[in-house]
Image (spheres, grey):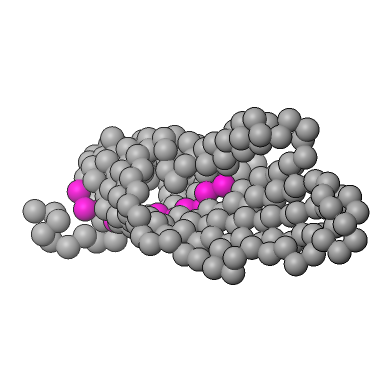
Amino acid sequence: MRNWILYLLILNSALSKAQAYELGDLSMNFNYGAPQITPAVIKVGLNLYYKSKWADNSYQFSIKNTGVYNAKLEYGVHENLSLGFAASYWSMGIDLQHNYNDNHPVTNVKTDFLDSYHFDVSAMAVGLRGNYHFFGGEKRKVIDPYSGLTIGLTKYTYNVGFKSDYPDKKLPADTYHYKSGLSTYFSGTLGMRVYPVKYLGFNFEVGFDRGAFLFGGVVFKIHTNPPQFLKD
């Protein structure tokens, strides 16, 4: 019993002295974000398009996506400001099938055919990240509410697969695999970090980042001695 009391006193002391954010903190977040708006928009668009063109449901499709994975590395340059980098990745797959009846090119007999399409898109993004921390200075808290802004670059990779029962039916070869150029992106979030222990915690964010609205994950923190020019 005495040992448990001692452990609780030590834990309480560590939590009461832990400062959630301060100058010189080096922190890294690993997060997962969902729901993602891109698959939802594509699904609605495909439904509207194919139902307006083919009311007989000869087209069927399914969409799978990974959600958004991101990592953020930041350094405390001011008692209320951290700067760093962000990286994120997401991918999505679309399977589309078209059932139709047509004359066979060899026998000239009406035959059922199936065309199958598979589309893959993935995105890798890197950017500069800044967080404003609402608690700082001498306020010793185990919670760290903040607001963040990221500006960065994204590169997309596309793959298209196709097969058909119809003899010799193919897609142009240049559509099978290609990469986009770099495009700019912006994201803004409101977040909260909670540290049950001094240098390990959990974080939650709400906003819009790479198409997702809600994020959650873990954060690791190391306190360093900041250079003198940051202290001045």
What x and y, as percent, mark residue 82? 27, 50
Vertical comparison of 150 with 122: above or below: above
Q: Is residue 199 left or right of residue 132?
A: right
What x and y, as percent, mark residue 197? 48, 47
What x and y, as percent, mark residue 154? 39, 56
Which residue is located at x 46 percent, y 58 percent? 156
Which residue is located at x 54 percent, y 36 percent? 41
Viewer-proximal residue, 149 or 102?
102
Residue extent of the magenta highlight: 66-78
Q: Does any portion of residue 200 appear in the rendered image?
A: no
What x and y, as percent, mark residue 94? 65, 50
Which residue is located at x 27 percent, y 53 percent? 83
Q: Is residue 103 left or right of residue 39?
A: right
Majority secondary structure in the magenta region: strand
Viewer-proximal residue, 90 or 179?
179
Viewer-proximal residue, 225 or 34?
34
